[in-house]
Image (cartoon, rainbow, N blue to C red):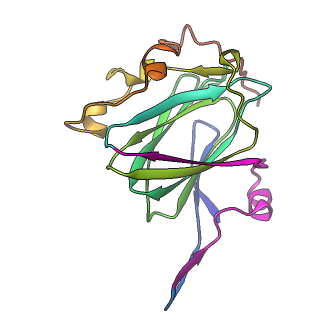
Amino acid sequence: MKIVQEYLNAVKVISLDRHPDARGYFMEIYSQDEFDRLGIDFHPVQDNCSHSLKRGTIRGLHFQKEPYAQAKLIRCSEGSFYDLAVDCRKKSPTYGKAVCIKLTKNDDLLVFIPKGFAHGVAIIEDDSEYTYKVDASYNGAPENNGGISCFYDPEQLNWDELLPDTELILSDRDRTGVSPTLEELDSGFVYEE
């Protein structure tokens, strides 16, 4: 494994090693020893899978507040999608900035998103699926969860370029149950050097 890109002073793209032979291939998806070697403090406690039926499905941008905040390790297992992360750490030099990383079934990449970021995906093709590990269990109480809806606005992300001629499909929660602007966002996260 190796880190091939870093965004917003924290989000990392990790390349995996594929070992092919006549039978197919073998690939190590996660290794605590490798993450320790890469200097990534991540100790997963839960593994999740999300499947989306239609292109244009948007999931997120969500986060859990402390003490339930989660770092995430994301991998595309079927189809393709854009992985989105927004820096929600007050006083961060990249506060409010977003990164959009395309992941596909065959790219052998992981995206690591640390605590302090809102996360979401935008599905590029029908029947796409991703798996992700988290380092804290989910807590569904409304006061422990947050999100940002302003990034559905074309002024924040160019959706016509990302998903041309595609209607965005959002949950009711993502349309109305999250902070509409960064100014109204109360994530509780503060940037520390």
Q: Is residue 15 left or right of residue 78?
A: right
Q: Position of residue 73 (x, y in %)?
A: 63, 49
Report the magenta residues as a range. 24-53
Residue lying at 50% horizontally and 30% vertically, measured from the top left: 60
Residue lying at 39% horizontally and 27% vertically, measured from the top left: 170
| Residue positioned most to the top | 184
Q: Nearer the viewer, residue 151 or 123?
A: 123
Q: Position of residue 47 (x, y in %)?
A: 67, 50
Residue lying at 51% horizontally and 51% vertically, measured from the top left: 130
In which quadrant is the N terminus drawn? Answer: bottom right
Residue lying at 54% horizontally and 22% vertically, measured from the top left: 96
| Residue positioned most to the left | 165
Q: Position of residue 111 (x, y in %)?
A: 57, 49
Total marks shown come to 0
| Quadrant of res 38 | bottom right
Q: Nearer the viewer, residue 88 or 128?
A: 128
Q: Position of residue 172 (x, y in %)?
A: 43, 20
Q: Nearer the viewer, residue 168 or 52?
A: 52
In which quadrant is the C terminus drawn? Answer: top right
- In this rendering, the answer to whether 131 lies above or below 94 is below
- In this rendering, the answer to whether 15 lies above or below 39 is below
Magenta run includes residue 45:
yes
Q: Is residue 179 left or right of residue 39?
A: left
Magenta run includes residue 46:
yes
| Quadrant of res 56 | top left
